[in-house]
Image (cartoon, rainbow, N blue to C red):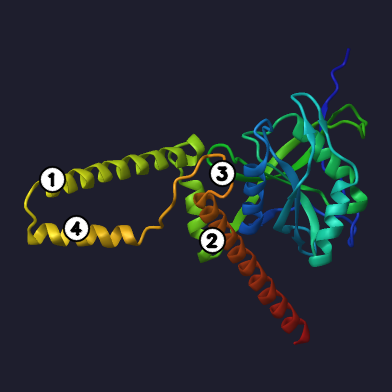
Amino acid sequence: MVDQPLYVSHPHFVGPRSFVLYPQKVTIDTQAIFQILGHAVRSPANHRRVVGTLLGYRNEDNSEVNVKAAFMMPLTETQYEISIPTGYQSEMFNAIRKAHPDYVVIGWYSTSSNISLLDSFIQNYFTEESSMFRYPPVFVHVNAEDNMEVKAYVTSQLFYGSTRNPDDCNCMFTPIEHSIEFSESDKPALAARTERADPDLYGLTSTISESIAEILTQIDLVAAKVAEIRRSKPTEATEKLGKYLFKMLSNSPVLEPSSKTNINDPRSAMFNAHMRDLVSIINLTNSIKSQVQLSTEVATRLN
């Protein structure tokens, strides 16, 4: 029996020129990173990762691509199988292109901690959709579980013998140069997301517990001081302290006791009002941003 040699295939993709090379550099916008992280946060707890499509721009010879946006794909995945719904991706892509007609499909992303065998099947799916994508897909790997490390890859098909089986999904992932494009306003958000010391809910649980414990300690100290003042003769210092405490308490909202089953709980009403204000601010910010981008684009085309 003669051993068959192993071949690495770099297929040519038909395009405006005679052939199109694989991308040599990937630039990822922070908006796309935040969208990917948002997909990972909102995913069900039993999903080990999120997979989605990357959109953006390519230069003329496809040597550089710019990832501007991403949307999630509702696939079904087990340890050994993966199922991608047909039609969903093209519908989402066509819907997004109504707002951004210049967007093209760059490739896909995954938020798992490492690259698995099933990633070859997903890469093969994007490669076979030549009528929609036409160019070699780029794979962006975002480690949303540990240190939020971002890597970009292109793939080459592996096959044995002198012929290649189109159904063979064996791929070799090759890292390529990538960079994250962000503005000064994006730095605090990126720092808050990456610099997390406690892995337990990103440190939120422990931080809240420490804050509550500190507040309870301060309340005990104030209560002990008030009890001591009531037992002793009032002085000028105690009068100033009493006025200060009265002023601070008068600024706090007064909440009537209510049962846990009461839907009209004032605490719930205050929280819901705060959330409504927050959503309104976010929507207003997005609306202003869209108007600025639209005005800039119109002015550019008129000039």
Q: Do labels 3 and 2 touch, CB within 8 Å?
A: no
The amino acid on which the numbered mark 3 sits, given as a three-letter code, is Asn
State the residue at coordinates (77%, 82%): 301
Give neighbour class at mark 1: few <14, some 14-19, many 20+ (Cα, 10 Å): few
> Circle 3 sits on which residue?
262
| First in residue order: circle 3 vs circle 4 | 4
| First in residue order: circle 1 vs circle 2 | 2
* Marks 1 and 4, how far apart at CA: 12 Å
| Closest to the observer, 76 or 226 | 226
Report the side of 10 relative to 269 (left or right): right
| First in residue order: circle 3 vs circle 2 | 2
The circle drawn on residue 242 is: 4
The circle drawn on residue 186 is: 2
* Marks 3 and 2, how far apart at CA: 41 Å
State the residue at coordinates (44%, 50%): 256
The total of numbered circles placed on residues is: 4
Q: Judging from the image, what secondary structure is the residue with disc 4 in? A: helix
Give neighbour class at mark 2: few <14, some 14-19, many 20+ (Cα, 10 Å): few
Give neighbour class at mark 4: few <14, some 14-19, many 20+ (Cα, 10 Å): some
Residue 191 x, y percent position in the rendering: 48, 52
> Circle 1 sits on which residue?
228
* Marks 3 and 1, how far apart at CA: 38 Å
- Image quadrant occupied by the N terminus: top right
* Marks 1 and 2, how far apart at CA: 51 Å
* Marks 3 and 4, how far apart at CA: 35 Å
| First in residue order: circle 1 vs circle 4 | 1
